[in-house]
Image (cartoon, rainbow, N blue to C red):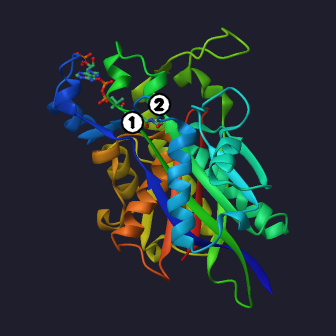
Amino acid sequence: MIRRSILLGTGSALPVRAVSNAELAQTVDTSDEWIVERTGIRNRYIAGEGETTASLGADAARQAIAAAGVAAQDIDLIILATATPDQTFPAAATKVQAALGIDDCVAFDVAAVCSGFLYAVTVADSMIRSGAANRALVIGSETFSRILDWEDRTTCVLFGDGAGAIVLGAEESVDGKRGILAAKLHADGRHNQLLYVDGGPSTTQTVGKLRMRGQEVFRHAVVNLASVLREVMDVAGLSTDEIDWLVPHQANARILDATARKLKLSPDRVVVTVDRHANTSAASVPLALDVAMRDGRIKMGDLVVLEAMGGGFTWGACVLRL
Ligand code: UT7
């Protein structure tokens, strides 16, 4: 028998306040035209008072648990991917655990910035396949608005807040055709200064602000995303023609177009939400996945590829059959 992690349900949560490019242009030296042309972003959500990474994560988790049709108490593992936790410690995952009323489980955060959700899913899948967990809640949740330099128009227009979550469950089958079929992660720490936060408890004792050299990140993103997608499909023994849906990290519509072109993948098979959510870092892939599951695009039996690239650099991809 082959033991695999099956996708049981998805969920998402957004802050109440939506902010359009036009609204942003009232306080930032930018324009709707520039943002749409260079990034494809039209809107983002900004967390208000009381809306935090853990509270958004818990809301997304409740939806995912309901969609999965399982009891919260049956969750034995929570992994939350974030670069913007409520507190330096304890992990935001433990706040979500308490909010969901789960008495006992394994709960921890993963820090891999925009690739965080891919890292979290890969760890959860390994724990499920090894027998260390049976039902995992995997969350990507961020409040990047709180680490943006609102005086820096080259970064502050690009990001938004939100959360997405999935429930994975162990399933044993003879053919192992469903579930997570392959995952591949990478990191290259030499690129720290291209995308980073200029503060932290052990250096400045402050939270710091996001800094990015956008053009250089862009170039690396297209190359790394295309290569890790090919690599993960090779590991799964599948061809890119077999992909029903690509759910990529939502940083820039031009990156999504360029990656799809490089892979000769039809744009119709790429889930795009960057226009409405902007870049929500670790939340972007599960948010986009939830949108496409709920609007009926992704169906049972579909072959779905998740992929992301972000600060570190870190990048990764994962193939699953629903
Ligand atoms: O999530 C992690 C991964 N992150 C990414 O993948 C982000 C990757 N990078 C990008 O998406 C793009 O590089 C950006 C959207 C950040 C920038 O787009 P770009 O086409 O590379 O623009 P640029 O940085 O070359 O800037 C072009 C011009 C500059 O003016 P000059 O020097 O040509 O006169 C900028 O000052 O656009 C100007 N500019 C702006 N203008 C209006 C930069 N930001 C803005 C702005 N509004 N917000």
Q: Position of residue 124 (x, y in %)?
A: 72, 59
Q: Which mark is residue 121?
A: none
Graded by Cα atoms within 10 Å as few (under 14), some (14 to 19) or many (20 or more), the crowding at tag 2 reads many
Q: Say which amino acid is labelled 1.
A: Gly
Q: CA distance from mark 2 to mark 1?
A: 6 Å
Near-viewer residue (51 or 110): 51
| Cβ of mark 1 under 8 A from ligand 1 | no
Q: Say which amino acid is labelled 2.
A: Phe
Q: Position of residue 150 (x, y in %)?
A: 36, 17
Near-viewer residue (172 or 106): 106
Q: Quadrant of the C terminus?
A: bottom right
Residue 185, visible in the rendered structure:
no
Where on the image, by quarter, is ligand 1?
Answer: top left
Q: Position of residue 88 (x, y in %)?
A: 68, 26
* Label located before the other in sequence (2 or 1): 2
| Cβ of mark 2 under 8 A from ligand 1 | no
Task: Tell me the SS state at disc 2.
Answer: helix
Pick out the residue farthest to the top: 204
Name the residue located 31 percent from the left edge and 19 percent from the top edge. 153
Graded by Cα atoms within 10 Å as few (under 14), some (14 to 19) or many (20 or more), the crowding at tag 1 reads many
Residue 121, visible in the rendered structure:
yes
Name the residue located 79 percent from the left edge and 65 percent from the top edge. 133
The image quarter in which residue 32 lies: top left
Up-down: is 270 above or below 37?
A: below
For the residues bearing labels 2 and 1, Cβ distance under 8 angstroms: yes
Task: Tell me the SS state at disc 1.
Answer: loop
Q: Which mark is residue 144?
A: 2
Up-down: is 320 above or below 151?
A: below
Q: Position of residue 188 (x, y in %)?
A: 66, 35
Horizontally, residue 124 falls left or right of residue 287, namely right
Q: Which mark is residue 160?
A: 1
Name the residue located 69 percent from the left edge and 57 percent from the top edge. 122
